[in-house]
Image (spheres, coloured by chain):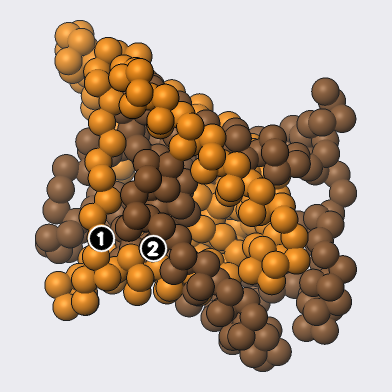
Amino acid sequence: MQRAANVRDNLQAREGGTIEKGSKAWYPYSKYLIVGIMFGIVFVKAEVISWFRIQEMFRLQSFHMYGIIGSAIMTAMISVFLIKKFQIKTLDGEPIKISPKKFNKGQIYGGLIFGLGWAMTGACPGPLFAQIGTGATVIVVTLCSAIAGTWVYGRLREKLPH
Amino acid sequence: MIALLKEPWPWYIAGPLIGLTVPILLLIGNKSFGISSSLRHICASCIPADIPFFKYDWKKEVWNLFFVLGIFLGGAIAVRLFPNEAPVTVNPKLMQELAGYGINDYSNLVPMDLMNWSSLFTVKGVILMVVGGFFVGFGTRYAGGCTSGHAIMGLSNLQWPSLIATISFMIGGFAMANLILPFILSL
């Protein structure tokens, strides 16, 4: 159903012909699909999505994951610094905007809960998608459970301490 | 080159490539790197149930769903075109510990001894996959991000709330792996 609706939207967008309508189609998003594919390949090749690697990390038995996360942060930090310093614009010429993160207690409570889940499943949300891609079909259950967890958070949000 | 494609990549290649995702997403579309938001967009698009947290224009965030679809495809492409030929090699101490729980199969990136369709009918399997998955989804949204949104994007933008979130992730992970997981694995 959903797919049929998307196809219809695409057709309408193409028939519409104007650039504005065209932007509703899928192809402007293909660049994100490609970045995602590269990212997924790195996840597999560096064993980032391995449950065993996550167990090693949380037992301080290997430098591998710390090296990956640490050097990823350093690379990203230098890039963001350069983007801000030279006021680099996007390819479309827009000024780059990064919204600041506001502190609330959720970062502690939610962070601890996610940490527990991370060591159980051996995966954060990104690796779940890649694990399913590698053929571990049962991880669909883990992913659905994560979607359910997100939904329950949305449902209970007002009652939780923030 | 071919050899490099068949071997697991070292941290100093993988880490910078993952980090480069941040400027790439900013440059190609002014998007902030983050993955757990995709779970929220899935809720908002499929099961909003009139909950205010899911009432927003998720179609504006559709790029994020394409990004995670790409991660899925990337996983599929990597195992088919250039798989890591040898099983994951981990610290012998970990292998010894896990062998004590009957975990010996390192052929896959997920532990086949723990995570397969029939283990869904065991207490251990339900706790690890269903409860664990729930914690991942609930916790990341409560924290407002995961390893990508907080640890990589947030820290690279020098956001101190992201540092607090990252420290909390690690405390939770250490507590689970060292104190609680031994009980779950011996069930």
Q: In the picture shown, does residue B119 fall above or below B51?
A: below
Colour given to chain A in the rendered image: orange
Tell me the residue at 30%/42% (across/down).
A2
What amino acid type is highlighted by mark number 2? Ile
**On the picture, is A159 further left or further right than B6?**
left
Q: In the picture shown, does residue B81 fall above or below A67?
A: above
Quarter of the N terminus of chain B within the rendering: top right
Q: Position of residue B81 (x, y in %)?
A: 74, 32
Q: Position of residue B149 (x, y in %)?
A: 40, 49
Quarter of the C terminus of chain B within the rendering: bottom right
Q: Position of residue A148 (x, y in %)?
A: 36, 67
What amino acid type is highlighted by mark number 1? Phe
For the residues bearing labels 2 and 1, Cβ distance under 8 angstroms: yes
Does residue A148 appear in this view? no
Residue B67 or residue B116, whichever sits in front: B67
Q: Residues within 10 Å of mark 2 (few under 14, many from 20)?
A: many
Residue A49 or residue A162, whichever sits in front: A162
Tell me the residue at 41%/57% (across/down).
B163
From the image, tell me which residue sits under label 1.
Answer: A103
From the image, tell me which residue sits under label 2.
Answer: B164
Colour given to chain B in the rendered image: brown
Q: Position of residue B130 (x, y in %)?
A: 49, 74
Q: How many marks?
A: 2
Real-space Cα separation, disc 2 to disc 1, in angstroms: 9 Å
Displayed quadrant of residue B16: top right
Residue B120 or residue A124, whichever sits in front: A124
